[in-house]
Amino acid sequence: MLPYDGGMSNEPSYLESLLDDALGDLSRLLDEANVREVMVNAPDDVWVERAGQLEPAHLRFSAAATRTVIQVLAALSARTAGFEQTRPLLDMGFRDWRISAVLPPVAVQGPALCLRKHGGRIFPLRQFTEGSPTGSTTTSPAPEISRRLDVQDQLLHWVQERKNLLVSGGTGTGKTALLNALIARIPETQRLVVIEDTRELRVEHPNRVVFEAHPAAGVTLRDLVRQALRFRPDRIIIGEVRGAEAFDLLQAMNTGHEGCLGTLHANSAEEALHRLVQLVLQAGMGWTEEAIARQVGRTIGGIIQLGRVEGRRQIDHIQRVEGYEHGRYQCYP
């Protein structure tokens, strides 16, 4: 295995050159404009997401080559010291990629690797209501969206009114891309604190501070949400709400920090609200599920649900949230 020293003494240029050599034919795939993701499932079993569709790459890539790529990436990351010996999982950002890797014995068929490219640019918000900004072709949005000509105006109104918004959807539905578009419409006079588990957002706001979780140093998303409150944020942006940090974020929203934005994995707008409750419960603060649901209903202003149909990413529906009563969220189009 390559030596690891926290990324301080190794020459980055040497390691990056080593990585480019190790990637081999994977580099060619990553260079294709319409390839979003490259996946190595097992030796000589490589798949790509091209123009929104999964397909085999028809190239050979050995277990040894995959392991070498993973080891070089680990050496380039200050987040993963000793990962191979203690926990054979790698999750990091590098260049314009989101990288996940798993080594044997956890990966039963051999080293597994997933390289996902971030969006190369920030798409204007109108493209999310006029058509798919990240799919293979320009298409109409979902029927319930296309009937509403004011979707873009509604989203802009929510941002300007400092509604707390969640962008929800499944994997690969464009949540990060839409969050980038919403962030781009925040007035430049406001100060943003951006928090991510792995860097994916492209924030070009003039007054911003960006934090990234650092598991090797014991710094979690929850730690960063708490720290953000001491950095005079006008808005807190969290790349993905995924754990007990949901409690601290909810508290921040209820103590004067309005206009927070984030993404969350869910298959519908209502499911996103229920999932947020479950994440808050993970904090173990002793609140009842009913009490949390009521606070979520008072705090979250809107849900933007994204979906994916035949490789196309689109807004499925948007829901205004106006409370929680009689065991149900009061949601409206």
Image (cartoon, rainbow, N blue to C red):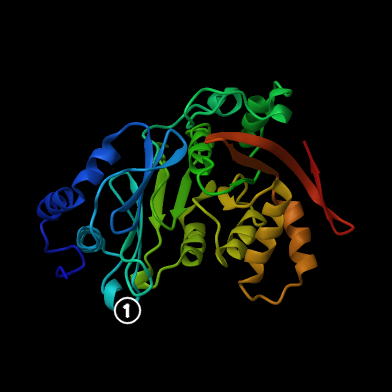
Q: What is the quadrant of the N terminus in the image? A: bottom left
Q: Is residue 284 visible?
A: yes
Q: Is residue 65 above or below residue 282?
A: above
Residue 291 located left or right of residue 326 = left
Q: Name the one closer to the observer, 299 or 21.
A: 21
**Secondary structure beneath disc 1?**
helix
- Percent x, y for residue 307? 61, 40
- To which residue does mark 1 refer? 86
- Percent x, y for residue 225? 51, 60
At 62% from the left and 33% from the top, the residue drawn is: 160
Q: In terms of image quadrants, where is residue 91?
A: bottom left
At 70% from the left and 45% from the top, the residue drawn is: 301
Q: Is residue 172 above or below residue 197?
A: above
Q: Residue furthest right?
A: 326
Q: In terms of image quadrants, where is residue 129?
A: top right
Question: What's the amino acid at mark 1?
Answer: Thr
